[in-house]
Image (spheres, rainbow, N blue to C red):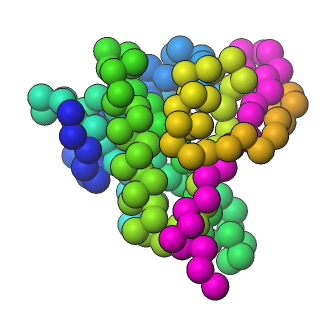
């Protein structure tokens, strides 16, 4: 397996993996499947997206997106990581998130943030292993299939970009 920056040509594979995550109901509040066209909108030139490939097949991806519109938050990005079902537990997600941290640093971000369902222990172990910390918990943050769900708030500083 190897990592690389994603391109628009990866949009279909990324949508396939994201749609598996949506269907599993363990990693996102989203319920509407995404198309390759939806994913193409992620490629805005500002927010890095990376993929992990094995044998020419995209196995996992990690993406950044905007956090808040205020200028003071310009160096903070939301982060997400998804591995295709066939690659879960094989290190693809870890590779994707590690590569995303690196590319976020190169892009000038000083912090990555995310939210994780409390019962998603695999994601919680992954983010801890890559230097994220659990900051707190949002109670009843949103409903998924009519059920209120909490989320764990996580963050990871990127020290190289915290210089005054």
Q: Is residue 141 left or right of residue 108?
A: right
Q: Observer-nearest residue: 94 or 10?
A: 94
Q: Observer-nearest residue: 10 or 135?
A: 135
Residue occupying image coordinates x 40% and y 32%: 93
Which quadrant does the N terminus fall into?
Answer: top left
Residue occupying image coordinates x 69% and y 62%: 68
Q: Is residue 98 left or right of residue 31?
A: left
Judge whether 82 appears above or below 149 on screen: below
Is residue 9 among what the camera can see? Answer: yes
Which quadrant does the C terminus fall into?
Answer: bottom right
Judge whether 19 appears above or below 52 on screen: above
Residue 43: image quadrant is bottom left
Residue occupying image coordinates x 61% and y 59%: 157
Percent x, y for residue 105? 45, 65
Instruction: Count every numbered label the image shows and give the total.
Output: 0
Q: Which residue sits furthest bottom?
A: 164
Q: Is residue 122 left or right of residue 100?
A: right
Residue range (magenta): 143-164
Q: In the rendered structure, does residue 151 fall within the stretch colored magenta?
A: yes
Q: In the rendered structure, does residue 66 fall within the stretch colored magenta?
A: no
Judge whether 138 appears above or below 67 on screen: above
Is residue 35 among what the camera can see? Answer: no
Residue 84: image quadrant is top left
Percent x, y for residue 111? 61, 60
Residue 83: image quadrant is top left
Percent x, y for residue 88? 39, 19
């Amino acid at each position: 397996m190897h990592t690389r920056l994603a391109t628009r040509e990866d949009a279909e594979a990324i949508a396939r993996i994201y749609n598996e995550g949506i269907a599993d109901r363990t990693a996102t509040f989203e319920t509407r499947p995404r198309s390759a066209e939806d994913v193409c909108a992620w490629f805005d030139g500002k927010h890095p997206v990376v993929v992990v490939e094995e044998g020419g097949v995209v196995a996992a991806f990690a993406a950044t997106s905007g956090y808040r519109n205020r200028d003071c938050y310009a160096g903070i990005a939301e982060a997400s990581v998804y591995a295709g079902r066939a690659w879960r537990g094989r290190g693809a997600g870890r590779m994707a998130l590690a590569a995303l941290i690196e590319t976020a640093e190169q892009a000038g971000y000083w912090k990555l943030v995310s939210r994780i369902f409390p019962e998603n222990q695999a994601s919680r172990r992954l983010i801890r292993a890559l230097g994220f910390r659990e900051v707190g918990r949002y109670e009843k943050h949103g409903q998924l299939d009519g059920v209120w769900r909490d989320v764990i708030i996580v963050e990871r500083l990127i020290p190289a970009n915290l210089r005054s």
